[in-house]
Image: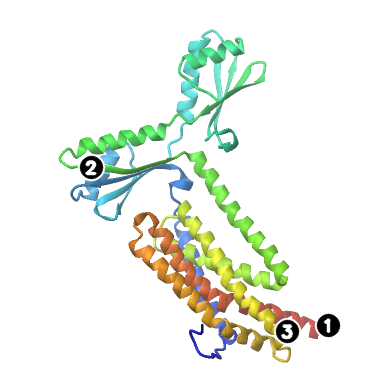
Amino acid sequence: MQFFGETKIKFVELRNKAFVISAVIILAGLLSLLIKGGPNLSIDFEGGTLIQVKFDQHVPVADLRAVVEKAGYENGEIQGYGDETEYLITIEKISEAKEAGEGLMESLLAAAPNAGWTLVSVKEMSPDYAKSFEGGNLVIVEAKAMPDLEELKTGVRENGTGFVEVTQESDNRLAFSLPYSGIESQAAELLKAEISNSFPEREIEIRRTETVGPKIGEELKNRMWAAIIISMFGILIYISWRFEFKFAIGAILALVHDVLITLGIFSLMGKEISLIVIAAFLTIVGYSLNDTIVVFDRIRENFSLRRRETYDNMVNISINESLSRTVITSLTTLIVILFLFLYGGEVIHDFAFALLVGVVVGTYSSIFVASPILVEWQNRITKRAKAKS
């Protein structure tokens, strides 16, 4: 199916203008990220608690903010969600280190009061999902007179402190691995109770409560970057194997271009980067790569069939020949995503928005970024060959 008739658009000749447009948009996004101190990461990565609350009537944001501050969360964020009766309340992550150390010391003093306990250090532990351990605190203590370890374990548990394991690091030093006590969940319950008590005349529905521990958020952030970097390396290897290394460079730069523009637009619009948005970013990478491979396939095919053409002309012809397919695929995809964006609800709103931006930018980059970079690379190879001869 042909969306256009035979086209003879000189895409390659327009590459410098396209590069300038891309550079301006990317720089605007990077400047926004720099000013704001990085992307606006959700609690999925930062840790904290999110409460979605709906009232039967409109409640002024100032009144709700006063309740949140009264509960002890001066830095809590409140934003509208859906209509004017619904809000998202986000409170920052709460460290359990102090409470973990103090709680263990109380249990140790109760279990072995004459041991002469000293708290050495407390540090957060990363999750170990293989052991079903969702993170916690490593508490190091020392004793002047070390009691029997098994009796101490029993005594500590009986006095209200649960632990995953205890390691004796030296004759007088123990390391306790303590799971998170759920202080963030407790904070969420207290805040919900405060909201209900502050608006007794309103019907209140708590629609969602999400809590992410600070260390789990950090772990998810690390895994996010690992997934993106590994996928980029995988693409580099695959394109180099299927085509040539110069094709891989064009594809990777086009993908980086797409992600940077989408990320920049999110920053400029103040939108959050959540796990579902990262899923959208990875989807954008796959979609853009597919578009680019279609054009690259046509370039490789024409390279064998049109040996008398200059490289620039051959790439132009290839882009024009695949233009109808590229536009039709993008339009049909955009129609579906647009319906998701308009009618899919708030939960997937940002996911659909990221895809909308990504599909448009990905289509643009497969024509104006990936292939022109290939031309630039080939022109440099040709110049070097002529210089040597």
Labels 3 and 1: the sequence-earlier one? 3
Name the residue type under label 2.
Ile
Q: How far apart are marks 1 and 2 (CA)?
A: 78 Å
Determine the secondary structure under disc 3: helix
On the image, numbered disc 2 is attached to which residue?
Answer: 204
Q: Compared with residue 357, is residue 147 higher up or lower down, i.e. above or below?
A: above
Q: Residue 332 carries which label?
A: none
On the image, numbered disc 3 is attached to which residue?
Answer: 304
Q: Distance between the residues labelled 3 and 1?
A: 26 Å
Q: Which of marks 2 and 3 is in front?
A: 3
Return the x and y of residue 129 as percentages of the image width and height. Answer: 57, 37
Name the residue type under label 1.
Lys
Instruction: Return the residue found at the far left.
Output: 201
Viewer-nearest residue: 292 or 370 = 292
Return the x and y of residue 22 as percentages of the image width and height. Answer: 52, 74
Determine the secondary structure under disc 2: strand
Return the x and y of residue 357 as percentages of the image width and height. Answer: 45, 68
Q: Is residue 116 visible?
A: no
The answer to whether marks 3 and 1 mark residues whose Cβ atoms lie closer than 8 Å is no
Q: Name the quadrant containing residue 131.
A: top right
Label 2: how many Cα within 10 Å (few below 14, some 14–19, many 20+): some
Q: Compared with residue 192, is residue 13 higher up or lower down, i.e. above or below?
A: below
Who's the residue at 65% across and 89% down the image?
313
- Figure label count: 3
Q: Which of marks 1 and 2 is in front?
A: 2
Q: Can residue 350 be seen in this view?
A: yes
On the image, numbered disc 1 is attached to which residue?
Answer: 388
User: How is this picture coloured?
Assistant: rainbow
Viewer-nearest residue: 311 or 17 = 311
